[in-house]
Amino acid sequence: MTKFLVTSGLPYANGDLHIGHVAGAYLPADIFVRFQKLKGNDIIYICGTDEHGAPISIKAESEKVSPQEIVKRYHESIKQAFDDVGIEFDNFSGTSREEHHRISQDFFSNLLEAGFINKKTTPQFYDEEHKRFLPDRYVEGICPHCGEDEARGDQCDSCGKLIEAIQLKSPKSKISGNTPIIKDTTHWFLNLPKLENELQEWLKTKTYWKENVHNFIMSWLNEGLIERAITRDINWGIKVPLKNTDGKVLYVWFDAPIGYLSSTVEWAKLQGKPDKWKDYWLDENCKLIHFVGKDNIPFHTIIWPAMLMKQKENYILPHDVPANEYLSINGKKISTSKNYAIWVKDFVKYFDGEYLRYVLAANAPEKKDSDFSWEDFQNKINTDLANILGNMANRVFAFSKKYFDGVILKPIKFSEISKKVFEKSDILFEDIEKDYSEYKVRKATRDIIEIARIGNKYFDETQPWKTVKLDKAKANETLFVCAELLRKISIVFSPIIPKSMNKLREILKLTKEIDWDSLQTKICEYNIGEVKPLFPKIQDDEIKYQNELLNKIENENVELEHKDEIEFDDFMKMELRIAEVIKAESIKKSKKLLKVVLKIGNETRQVIAGISQFYKPEDLIGKKVVALFNLKPRKVMGIESQAMILSAEENGKLSVLIPDRSVSTGSEIR
Ligand SMILES: [Zn+2]
């Protein structure tokens, strides 16, 4: 039996959970934990919310509430989102709890005592209007590494590199919008250069880490390790455990990973066995695995191990950090600040959380970034789950109910074609076990669906609808082989879609308790119970609606390019009037143009308008529209156009402007 301690990067308690979070650090961990539990290994899954740092205090200040209130709100919301998609932690804590403060201060004191923390006076940005220092996200500017705008004072979203706020070019205070001045302040620094050799030696043993993680670390090490400030000038956080340090707290990135330990300590206490955390953290045979998103790699592979190395207790170091890359939506980066995301709480209003689990597993950003689109979501659910697996199950259930009263018996002997199916699928079942242990969830989903595909093909080839009339035993054999595949799928698919597999097992009248070894269990008889639909299909209009919601967000984020200012007189030069469409006809040889006759007062004007794709002639007749009348007449396809009908354009689609009350033709627009 192997012992594991699994963690996922602590989500920040300043916002809700979106599907990119789930795909990055939580679903892969949850699947791994569920798999290891099936294997009978000793494993606990620990997490909690990250409740300190500038993002939370900034949000609290902008909403004029306490940081505690922000933390409470999002801790609850995040916890609910995890429940909704079936992410099951053994403990879910939070870093503003007392125990965490105590343990974090101990970490600091131990490192200081061991000579790995230096105190230094350093220049910092300072907002003169608000009389305060501007750490981390309190300042934004141009990234010194990649030149991208809007880099934050702690890390650049664009290139992923860590930034010392002071390095930002063209800095701006987030509080006042002013350019900050530079002022000296005192901080404590983790002496990473002093630990470099030891870290290098340790990292050399990690030959089995994922390639993307390895590459990230190498680029970091090649740049050389520098001393990193581990304190900040803000009030929200863990007090520096030294005298005369008012207004200084531990940097959130120093205390956050300690949350893995403090959450385990809390878990042990809740178990009524306060020392039980030691069975994991102090047992050198326990494998500590940190699931994180790509931006968290340096903290978990360099800074956090460095912190652990110099403690009084002999803590285990990370065994693996299987970090994932990013998930984008429709090819665009998820952005919480622009609200461009699919939030879990919204997703579960429309679809089952299991569907999200399946699609994010099948499309996991394991080696490179991957993309989510609603079309792909619909396609994966309807094809893989409904048409392939669901269809196979339904055929077996319906057929056995119709001809065998739902009772399927093990044949005395299997035919060659059945033996082949077992052989082929057994290889895949072994592959799936390997996939899970190597965090290859994408491949696991492919292998599982492949088994269902084999089952369908076998059903087609053995033609039970024919054999049932000639040789009933043959039809029974087909059903038994398929039922065996379904039973095994219900085991190996359960780390990814546990609820659905439980449903499948209920129909097959199998026990709820499962383990990996039961793949080998010998079954003599299946008895099909009440059949329930396993995977309802997703309809086109559901996807259309979700895309409309996404488009709405995108349009709200469009950055407008403004034109030069004009004088009021310039505006008054335009003769804009209400006019009635009295005639409209399409123009032969043109898909885009309509010939429209407008009436204003006692005059009529002929207009050539490029709206034929959006309006039929009969839709326009009788409508009162807005038109520009003193535009120089011009010829379009040889026909004179004597005015211009105004319309709003959105993604190339035109909508004609119509006044919101009835007004007489000729009325002027101003
Ligand atoms: Zn950058």
Image (cartoon, rainbow, N blue to C red):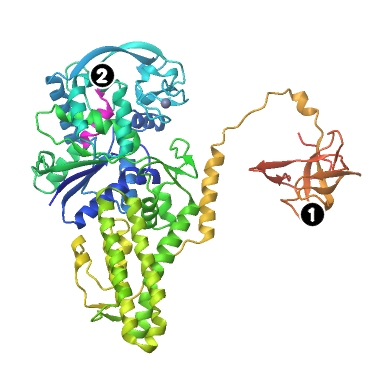
Please identify, in this view, whether the residue under mark 1 or under mark 2 is nearer the observer: 2
Residue segment shown in magenta: 246-259
Q: Nearer the viewer, residue 513 or 469?
A: 469
Q: Residue furthest right?
A: 602
Please give the label number shown on residue 517: none
Please give the label number shown on residue 227: 2
- Circle 2 packing at 10 Å, graded few (<14), some (14-19), many (20+), is some
Instruction: Residue 262: give x, y in percent of width and height.
Output: 18, 37
Instruction: Residue 310: give x, y in percent of width and height.
Output: 14, 26
Three-letter code, disc 1: Pro
Q: In this orientation, does residue 535 appear?
A: no
Q: Residue furthest bottom?
A: 470
Q: CA distance from mark 1 to mark 2?
A: 72 Å
The reply to whether discs 1 and 2 touch (Cβ–Cβ < 8 Å) is: no
Three-letter code, disc 2: Glu
Q: Which residue is labeled 1 in the image?
A: 617
Specify which label sits upstream in the sequence, 1 or 2. Answer: 2
Classify residue 646 as left or right of residue 188: right
Image point 31% across, 36% down: which residue?
A: 213
**Relative to 177, residue 80 above or below:** below
**Relative to 310, residue 521 above or below:** below
